[in-house]
Image (spheres, rainbow, N blue to C red):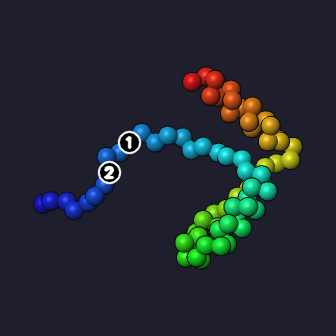
Amino acid sequence: MASNSKEKPTQAQQPLRTYLIDSVKLTEVMRYLMTRPYGEVVKLMNMLATLNQLDPQIGADFVKQQAVETNAKK
């Protein structure tokens, strides 16, 4: 029996990347999205609205330093 499945061949998944975005850039993106039709952007706006804040005890510079070290190992 033939399968009608359109599954793509399984490829090795790359690890998820984590990005930092400051509140100013986030606000600019949200303002832009508010100018677009609701149906096109509602899912994206909901994802952006649920972003977690970075713990103030950690600091963004620590995360950036860690990423540079990881890239240097490649």
Locate residue 46, reporting x and y percent: 64, 68
Quadrant for the C terminus in the image: top right
Q: Is residue 18 above or below residue 26?
A: above
Amino acid bearing label 2: Lys
Quadrant for the N terminus in the image: bottom left
Query: In the image, 31: left or right of 7?
Result: right
Task: Please tell me how crowded label 1 is: few (under 14), some (14-19), or many (20+) other residues with Cα within 10 Å.
Answer: few
**Residue appearing at x 42%, y 39% in the figure:** 12
Q: Which residue is mark 1?
A: 11
Q: Residue furthest bottom?
A: 38
Q: Which numbered disc covers residue 8?
A: 2
Q: Is residue 10 above or below residue 24?
A: above
Q: Are marks 1 and 2 in contact (CB under 8 Å)?
A: yes
* Camera sees residue 50: no
* Camera sees residue 71: yes
Q: Secondary structure at mark 2?
A: loop
Query: In the image, 43: left or right of 6?
Result: right
Locate residue 15, reporting x and y percent: 54, 40
Q: Is residue 18 above or below residue 6?
A: above
